């Protein structure tokens, strides 16, 4: 495995850490691997380390290249989305260098990072974003998305902290609706895998439900898993914080293999 880190903005406040599996002779697809671009959570105030590298390693084990993005935080919309879109475009442009397949690139996000991944999945053809990045809309479109206990709606059970960062302390209902991803799903949205826990007290599972409903209404392939128990920020569910059993949920850990199966199916891996 090779690990590389590079900046994605002139201020060097946002960067990507690339985890690249070795090219192995006699394994055909190694020269053109599928990949997953990961956006950690943190309420748009910071990027959680717990939702970066530990998740990347799970996909590496499944033969994926993984890219963990530290995006601009504590900045109003669309700054984080510009980082996400720019990253996705540049990774596609450098696909040969990274030995990845530009047609098999998924996004994954946790919590507020799930909102950001969902923004890219639903707003990839927004003309203002396309013009800012300076590429074609298709170069920004993920081939699939994985949303982990995501922030979705500014209207239905909103995570107020995330939307205050993006829109200010007193956002209008119109602005909240504009950044509510259930309103941005179209028939051109890529396949989406969603999971959450029913007793998440930080980001209500209602967010995942309204997103799944929007996908169904637009005939977008969607897979939703709602587990009965698990604290917010559970990540890989394998007790990443010492002496805190609330993060140890072997049953919920199934989301990892389930999501890989979903990506394999819809990206023809």
Image (cartoon, grey):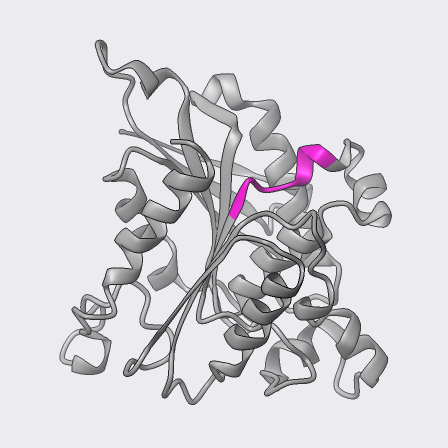
Which of 196 and 110 lies nearest the eye of the viewer? 196
Instruction: Write down the quadrant of residue 20 in the picture.
Output: top left
Tell me which segment is drawn in magenta. 138-144
Question: Quadrant of the image for the N terminus?
Answer: top left
- Hey, which residue is sitting farthest top in the picture? 26
Above or below: residue 137 compared with residue 40: above
Tell me the residue at 57%/56% (across/down). Answer: 117
Q: Is residue 140 magenta?
A: yes
In the rendered structure, the answer to whether residue 104 lies left or right of residue 244 reads right
The percent coordinates of residue 127 (x first, y second) are 85, 46
Going 65% across and 50% down the picture, which residue do you hit? 189
Give residue 265's quadrant in the image.
top left
Q: Is residue 198 visible?
A: yes
**Residue 140 image position (x, y, % from top left):** 67, 39
Residue depicted at x 42% and y 89%: 201
Q: Is residue 194 above or below residue 53?
A: below
Q: Is residue 136 left or right of residue 68?
A: right
Name the foreground residue: 16 vs 213. 213
Left or right: where does residue 234 sit relative to residue 143? left
| Residue 180: in magenta span | no
Quadrant the C terminus occupies: top left
């Amino acid at each position: 495995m090779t690990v590389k880190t590079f900046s994605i903005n002139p201020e060097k406040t946002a960067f990507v850490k690339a985890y690249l599996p070795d090219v192995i002779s006699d394994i055909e697809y190694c020269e053109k691997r599928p990949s997953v671009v990961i956006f950690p959570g943190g309420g748009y105030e910071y990027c959680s380390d717990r939702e970066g590298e530990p998740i990347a390693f799970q996909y590496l084990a499944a033969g994926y290249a993984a890219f963990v993005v530290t995006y601009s935080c504590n900045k109003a919309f669309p700054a984080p989305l510009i980082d996400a879109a720019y990253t996705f475009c540049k990774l596609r442009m450098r696909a040969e260098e990274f030995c990845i397949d530009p047609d098999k690139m998924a996004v994954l996000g946790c919590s507020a990072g799930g909102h950001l991944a969902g923004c890219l999945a639903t707003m990839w053809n927004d003309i203002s974003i396309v013009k800012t990045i300076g590429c074609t809309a298709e170069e920004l479109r993920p081939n699939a998305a994985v949303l982990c206990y995501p922030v979705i709606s500014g209207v239905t059970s909103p995570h107020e902290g995330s939307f205050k960062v993006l829109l200010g302390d007193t956002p209008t209902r119109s602005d909240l609706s504009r950044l509510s991803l259930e309103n941005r799903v179209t028939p051109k949205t890529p396949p989406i895998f969603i999971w959450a826990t029913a007793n998440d007290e930080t980001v209500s599972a209602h967010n995942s439900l309204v997103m799944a409903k929007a996908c169904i209404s637009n005939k977008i392939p969607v897979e939703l898993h709602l587990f009965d128990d698990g604290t917010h920020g559970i990540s890989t569910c394998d007790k990443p914080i010492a002496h805190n059993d609330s993060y140890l949920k072997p049953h919920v850990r199934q989301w990892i293999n389930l999501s890989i199966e979903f990506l394999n199916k819809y990206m023809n891996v």
